[in-house]
Structures are given as structure tokens and as C-alpha cells.
Image (cartoon, helix red, strand yellow):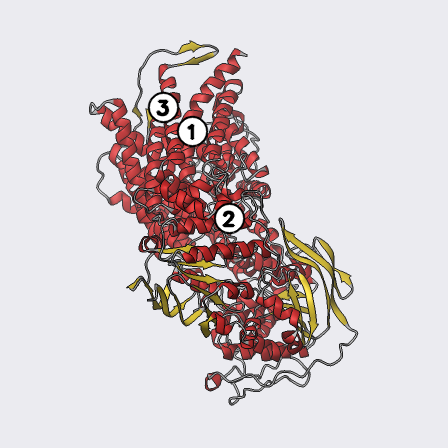
Amino acid sequence: MLYFLTDLLVLGCINSIMVVGLNLQYGYGGLLNFAYYIYVALGAYIAAVTTMGPSTTPGISYALGWTLPWWAGLIIGGLVSAAFGTLVFLLTVRRLRSDYLAIVTVAVAFIVWNLIDTYQPLFDGDTGLFNVPQITGSANISTEGYSAIILAVSAVCLTVFVWLSRRIFRSPFGRLLRSIREDEQVTTAFGRASWQPQIAVFTIGSFLAGIAGGLLIFYISAWSPSAFLPLESFILLAALIVGGSGNYWGSLLGAFVLIEGLGEISRYVPSFGNGADVGALRQVVIGLVLILMLRYRPEGIIPERWLKWYRTREQPPAPAAAAATASSGPDGEPSAAAPPLPAAARAAAPFPEPRAAAAAPDGDVLLDIRGVAYSYGGARAVADCSFSIGRGTVTGLIGPNGAGKSTLVEILSGRLAPQSGEVLLDGRSVGGLGPVVLSRLGVARTFQTARVLPRLPVIENVMIAAPAQRGEGPLAAVLWQRGWRDQEAALRKEAVELLGWLGLSSHLDRPAGSLSGGQRRLMEIARALMARPRLLLMDEPTAGVYPETSQLIARRVREIAEAGVTVLLIAHNMAFLSWVADDVVVMAEGRVLTRGPLEQAREHKDVIAAYLGVAAGEPRGPRASSVGGGE
Amino acid sequence: MTVLRAEGISAGYDGPPVLDDVAVAAEPGQTTVILGPNGAGKSTLAKAIAGLLRIRAGRVLLAGADVTGLAPHKLVRRGLGYLPQLASVFDHMSVLENLEMGGYTLKGGLHRRIAQVLELFPDLGTDNGKKAGALSGGQQRMLALARLLMTEPVAAVLDEPTAGLSPLYAGRVWDQIDRVRETGVGLLVVEQNATLAMEHADSVCLLAQGRNVLSGKAEELRERAEVARILVG
Amino acid sequence: MSHLLQAIGFGVVTASIVALAAVAVSLQISVTNFFNFAFGDFMSFGAYVAWTANREGVNFFLSVLLGGIAVGLLGMLANHLVFRPFMRRRVRPVTLLIAGVGVSFVVQDALILIWSPAPRRFSLNLGQAMHLGPFLLTPGDLIMIGASAVLLLLLHLMLTYTKFGKAIRATSNNIDLAQSCGIDSDRVISLTWFIAGLLTAVAGVGLVLQESTLSPTTGFTELFIIFGAVILGGIGRPYGAMLGALIVGVLTEVSGAYLNAAYKTSIAFGVVVVLLLFRPQGLIKARGLIS
């Protein structure tokens, strides 16, 4: 009985290590690896051939044949798996859509499996390896005793790896991974390249697979290709998803319940037909559970969001009495004491009087756009666009549909490279440098449709944007917590202040996906400010929000500008613009039509004509003959 | 007797409603244009009426019958046509096949109807085997209109039929729309180019920020300065 | 040289089987836009039904037809119960792939429960291999190639000339527009699964006859070769899938003839992977169901 229990626990621990490793790759990194079990197999084989010594039996051949101590074999097995994982990642991940990629990983797995199965000198082909030395060497130990030892070793390894998962989860590295997983574009828009963190987590996950394989082979003492069919990867994946992807406790639950638990229960099901039936029934159950989970509770039994290791205790100061007027602190910094708009003021109050015309522009130019052009295929979106923006001003960018405004913002944020012309930021040419570089140079943006990371808490959404965070690399995250722990607290405090300033204090820990449209836009502003930008690009910041939120946004934008940030925003709501913008640039058909105070622009006859559209003008010629008489 | 009426419409995508309590109507043989500044919800209204977007509140009446919430393919059988803004033709299929698809719900007489429709669209007559994707933008719109007419709808919703076309072709498309109107179809046309649209419209429905702001006969509204004001924003 | 030509001949036989399967996958993807991971198990299911019917004395071709209908219905069921509810909620493509994994578990292991995991013998002894020019083929091989060609031709005719075939092409081209033409896209998708299922079953039978053994994992092991052919030919492009199948089939056999036959599948995989990495859009640029 005890032996049975020990066996259960050993396999449970080893399977858990596998699922925890897969959790790092898929749960944390969003990388679907159908070939995971191959990494386990590699670890097993390498552990064996580095500890077995040369073959003494004729007909059995395998590579290496060293006689290293067991722990060295184990670690080398892990490292080889990790290296293989890195290699596969480098070759494949950047190029394909995620589901096609998953299929390619199976192909890779098959090739490796085929090689191992056929090429005898490697790992003795389809016969496999036997008599792998025990970790206790030649000491004479009972089976139960040996199991207990393996259990101890496995449990220790599992504990270490769970600790590792936990440490990564709480670190900036973990946050960065989650951000990439949810929305890669947003992550790059805030200055992070995405593939380095992903390759790191993929490699670590592969290392865990290798260790699990090594432990398994030391336990069973034998291994052959029939033991590591592709099927196993899918069972691990099912365990991960059912248990709870992204949550390491979920990984343990999945491994113990789905793999071990179901496996053991099947012993008690009276066998019908032949022995394989029970195993097949178990698989059917796994398949059904997987489908049902995906459908009704895709986060799994123990979801990621239950890992609430932070509880945002610091609340911003209680709101002052209803104050609908703007309040910017005397030093120009966003005032943490500025209250969220109280409910009483939600009745649609008209905007305060429009701003007086802007003072004469000072000579301090932040952004200079010269002759920029961009075409999508044959369609010209931006053509010879030129204007400049002074530091600390708020400039509106308006114009009818198709004028090229959004394209221009894409160019300024770095997502598109101008096909001609230049963009100068503080005198430096930045056109075409890409969003990561531009973000680090101080350009932040909000999106036309607010892009949040829906499964992550609001406060994490904002913290991701802070530049130059320590602990975003895997080594720093795991080994040097001292370096980033205080930074985390400081960032958290700053994010809380910003969110409070934007009226979101009661939503800090909620998943961002639960925010309303207006709240999302406010969150986007907080996030952009967290990046400490010099230039803030906003694309329709008040589209689809209620008037009172629109007013709040207007007030905040002015305060942002007064703090020295330059703002360029696309907007259509003239009331909003009149309150917020110093002047406007009117674009039509890719060009700048006019520049000046809003009221003047609205009366400008060319501007009106651009919005109203042009009459069919040309005298109608005789009907052109059919096809080919095109435009 | 109004052939197509939408009233109290509230609709949107994920999130808050884009349209709030919007009403619009089309009379047989008349064109009602839907105008408005950016973000007014014009396209959303078109999609909602055509059954491609869930209507959260309000109803749509087609020839007196309540068709609110019916799937697009059922609306076609009731006599409603729809011309989408982008991707208005099957670009991998030939001109002839596009028309055949338009006539999918016809029981018999498909080729006779195709011949009839082609008479209205002489531009399309010659090379039926050409892939629709190889046609120019203006010709594609013509084809889309022709496809729509295959079922002899009583009413049709056109979403920016002149978007992206040169002024010359935009005018041609509008002439074609006028001809369609003459066959008795009640038309709702969403348009960005207000000047051109108002030259051809019988009625105008002006939207801003998801609400009705102004409606009336085109000839009355044509000169009113506030129309320009609303459109600029 | 004759060795090479013989290998090419075998490759064509393999290709004809893979082509049926790849075209079925491509057809289904063109209207649903995701890989059905349980596809291989659908093939096995079709082969099992055909084998059972045949063992009970049903005429061979009729057995295959029964298998086809069975898989067609299975596809429609899977679509209705599993895939369509997911697609309605617009989940990520990866989720649909994993859902397919779940379906694969259920189908493959149901096969084990119903028919037991022991491999069965399924062969048609129609005569010895004959020399036809430079090729060495059995009558069974010829029937396979012929059946594949006929079925693909019928599919082509259906897609090109029938109203329903055009409805499939319209749905795959622009689903909203198709609906606005009065096409019930749910029904079209459902029937497309059925048609794909018919082809899938025939491919499954062909596969089994080639190996002469039938086991619950037969289809699954071929799954990636088929997906490879589909990806190679351009996803959602049945004509591309045929070309992909030809390349994969011939490559497999030729490499098997000249190198260690045990590696032939790996080599085919490897080439597909490499080609995919450098040309992910596939070999055929033309889009749409009829290029």
C-alpha cells in the first residue's frame, strides 16, 4: 500500500514538473508547444547516456556513455533540452501564426522521434535503453526505499520549480511576459521587444522538461521510443488547461488530478473488453473535460487571476467636495489630490468657455514633420504633409474620413515608416525607427479603439508602460529580487496615483477587460503617462464616451500639457477640441489644408468643402465603353 | 406608405452603444441619404438595419412587417438589399457568378433576370467571365448594385457606395442609383460626400454622435448653413 | 533511373491519397479558417466503418460510401457541438486547435473502445503488381489513383458549376456578403463539413489499404503529412493542396527509395517545415477556391 502511494506521488511530482514547465511556455509565454514531450525524452536519454558508462552488451549501442554522477547527468539532460528548445524557438517562432506554428512543432517532434527510433548509434533505436544506473549507485536498496529517495529528490525539484514560477510571476519579467501574451503590439508600443522574454521562458520551460525526463528515467531505469509518443504532450496540455493555465497551483492540480487521479481511478473501473479499454476511456474523459473547460471555463479550475499576491492597499486621498473645475498643482505636476468627477456632476454640464486663442508660438519646436508621404499599395494616404508642433502645446488633428490622420499617427509612433520626408523629434530624425525605439525616445500613444490587456488587472496594465524597469530579464528577475522589489513598490505607488487622478481608483485590481469604454480610455491615458513621454499621441480619445468623461479627459489633457508634455490628438468632437486644443491642423486627402485656431478652421471655406465633399464637377463625358473605361 | 422604417434603434459593437434612439425611413421610389460627421454611427446604422449587427433596442419594419433581429439571409428573402461599404463584391468570382449569387434566392428565371439587370448596367455587359477583383473600383460598385437588384428588392441599404471613387465615377454611380430609384426601390444611402449626395437625395437624415439631429426634405435642407456646421462637427 | 521512376510512381499513389485528404482539409478551412486537429481520427473512423461493413459482406465500394457518410455526419456533429459554438464567440485560432485536440482524444479513443486497439487486416487482393511503362503498380494502386482523380474532378465540377458549389466559394470569399445574398452560411458550412467528410473517409480507406493494416492511430500518424501538404499548397486553396500533396507524396517515396526508408516521413516533414519557414504563405499564391 505504501509503495503504491509512493509511486503515485513520485509520478505526480514528475508530471507536475512537466506541467509547470509547460505552464511557463504556454501559460506565461503564450507559446503552444505540441512537442513538449520530446524535450522530456531528450532529458531522459541524455541523463541516461551520461551516467551509464559504455555499452557492455553486444547489440546495444548509444552515444556518449560517460559515467558522471547522477545529478550531473540530470542537469546536463536539462541543459540539452533547454538548448534544443532555444534552437527550435529561434527557427520557428517569429515566422508563423500561432496555430500553424503549433503544428510545425509537432513536425519537429516527429522528426526527432523518428531519428531516435531509427538511428541506433544515438540511443539504441527502438529497443531503447535499459539498466540505467540508480541514483544510489550500486548500494543495495529495496524498491520501496529507492522510490522514497526518488520521491524526495523529485519533491525537492518540484518545490524549487514552483518557487521559480512564483518568483517569475511576481517579477517585472513575469508581467512583461503576460503583456506580450495578451497583446504584443501594445507591448512593443511601450518600448519592449517581445522575442527576448519569450525565448527565455521557452528555454526555461524546456529545461524543466529535461529535468523531469531525467528523474523519470532514474525512476524507471529504462526508456524507449514507445514510451514517449506524441500523445503525451497533449495530455500534459490538457492537464495544464484544465488545471488553470498561467497559475502554477493549477499546474499541480492538473498533473495530480487529471493525470494521476484519473489514471488511478481507472484501476478501479472494472475492466471490460481488454485492458486497453480503460486507458481509452480515460482519454475520452480527458478529451471531453478539455472541450467543456475551454468552452465554459477557459481559465481553468484555478485561474491565473487568483494569484492575487498584491492587494492594492495604498488608496489615493479621499475625494474633495464636488469640484468641476480644473485643478492643476502649482508646480504643474498632475495633482494626486484632484478628485474623480463626483456622481452629482454627471448631468451633462456644458463645457466651460472655449480657450482664448493660443499665445504666439514660442520658438521651441518639439516635433517637426517635413514632406512625409505614405501609400498603402496604390492608395495614397499621406502626401507631402508638413507642420510642426511646439513643446508643451496641445494640437488637434482634424479632417474628414480618409484624410490620413490615423496613418500619420502610425508614422509618428513608429509603426509605419514614412516613404518619403522626415520626422524630427527634438531635432533628431526618427522616421522609420520602429515603435520600440520611438517609445524609448519618449513617444507614447493611445489607440483609436482602446487596447487594454483584458485579463490583467488595471494596475498591471499601467505598470507595464514604465520605462527602464529592472528585473525584466529572467536572471535579474529570479536571482536579484533585491534590485527590483523596491522599484515595484514605487511603480505601484505611481500607478495608483495616476489612476486615481483619472478617476479609476476603485478599479485598480479588476481585470481591464471589465472596464467600460470610457474607463478604458482613461486607463490608456494613465498608461501613456506612466511611460513619461515627451510627446503624447492620442487617436480619438473621446470616441464613444459619455460627456462627463469627455470633460474629465479634456481637463486632464490640459494639465498634462501644462506639465510640459506635448500632445497631438485626433478628434472629431468640436466641443472637446475647443476646450482642449491650442490650435488645430486640418488634413484632407493626405495633405495639410490649414493650420490655426479651431474657430478659424471651422469657418475656412476649404475646410468646409473638404468635409462636405466635392460635387461631381467634371462635365459628364459620353458613356465610356464598358470595361477598361475605369477611373 | 413607408417601405423601410427603423425607429428607436440602439446598437453597437462590444461596449457602449454607438447609436441611441435613432430613426430613419425610406419611401418607395425615393432616396433618403444618411449623413453625419465622423463617428456619427452611419455605417453602424446601415449594418444594424441589414441584420449584420445586433439591435439592442428599437425595431425595423420592412413593408409594414417587423423584421427586427432577422438574420441577413432571411432579410434578403423578405425583400431587403444591402450593399456593404468595403468588399462589396466576391472578388474571386466572375462578374456573372457575382450576379448568380445575387440571384441565389430566385426560384427559376435566373438567367432571364441576369439579362434584365445587365440592361440597366451597360458597363458590365461585355466580359462576364472576368474576375470581379480585376475590375476597377467604380465597376465593382456597379456590379455590387447590379447584384443587389437581382432579387428585385423593395428596399435597399447602401453603405457609402461612392467611397474611394474619383468624382467622375462617384457621379456615375449616383446616376445609376437614380435609375435604381426609378424602378421603385426605396433607398437608404449612407454617404460621406454630402454635397454630391444631397444633389440626388429626396430626403436627408443627419446623424451626429449616434443621434438624430436633423431630418427633412433635401430641397429644404440643401441651403441651410447648419447642415455644414453639423457635418464639420 | 528506372528506380527513380518507380519511386515516383509510388509517390503518385501516395499523393493521390494525400490529395484527397488535403483537399478535404482545405475545403473545410476555406469556410471555417482553422485546422481540425481531429482530422486524422476522422480518417480512421471512416476506414473502420468501411472495414466493418465490408466484413459483414457489404460490397467494397458501398462500404466505402457508408464510411464516407459516417464521417460526413461525424463532421457535421463535431461542427455543431464543438466548433461552431467556439467560432460564434470569436475565440483565438489556438483555442480552436486545442478544441480539436479534445475532439481527437474522444474520437480516437472511442475507436479503441468500439473496435479494440489491435491492428486489423484490411486489404484488397486485386492482383500482382504490374509493369506499366517505367512504373510498378498493383491494380489496387491504379484504382486508388483513379478514384482520387474522379472524386477530385467531381469536386471541381461541383464547385465550378453547381449552385451550392458557388455558395461555398462565396461563403469562403466573403461571408457577410454571402449572407446578404440570401445564402444561409451556417447551412453551407455544415454541408461543407459533410462533403469534406466524404473525401476524408475515402482517403482513410486508401491509407489503410496501402499499409494493409488498420489501427486506431492510422489516421493520426498521417495527420501532419496532410497538414504539411495543405500548408505547402497555401491554406484554404484546394488546388494548392493537390500540388502540395503531389510534392509530399513523391518526395516521401523518392527519398525512401534512395535513403533509409525509415526516414522517409521525416524527410518529407523536414522539407515541409523548411519550405514553410521560408514561404509561409505556401507555394501557390493564387487565392480563392478556384484559382
x%, y% of residue A278? 27, 40
- The reply to whether label 1 and label 2 mark residues of one chain is no
- The reply to whether label 1 and label 3 mark residues of one chain is yes
Mark 1 or mark 3: name the one nearer the start of the chain. 1
Residues at marks 3 and 2, CA–CA distance in whole angstroms:
40 Å
User: Disc 1 or disc 2, which is closer to the eye?
Assistant: 2
User: Disc 3 or disc 2, which is closer to the eye?
Assistant: 2
Q: What's the residue at 40%, 21% (across, down)?
A: C145
* Chain designation of label 3: C
Q: Which residue is mark 1?
A: C18
Dot 1, crowdedness within 10 Å: few (<14), some or many (≥20)? many
Residues at marks 1 and 3, CA–CA distance in whole angstroms:
13 Å
Q: Amino acid at mark 3?
A: Ala
Q: Which residue is mark 2?
A: B140
Q: Amino acid at mark 1?
A: Val
x%, y% of residue A359? 73, 81
Q: Which residue is mark 3?
A: C147
* Chain designation of label 1: C
Q: In the rendered view, would you say B85 is above or below A269?
A: below
Q: What's the residue at 34%, 40% (across, down)?
A: C193
Between B65 and A568, which is closer to the camera in this rendering?
A: B65
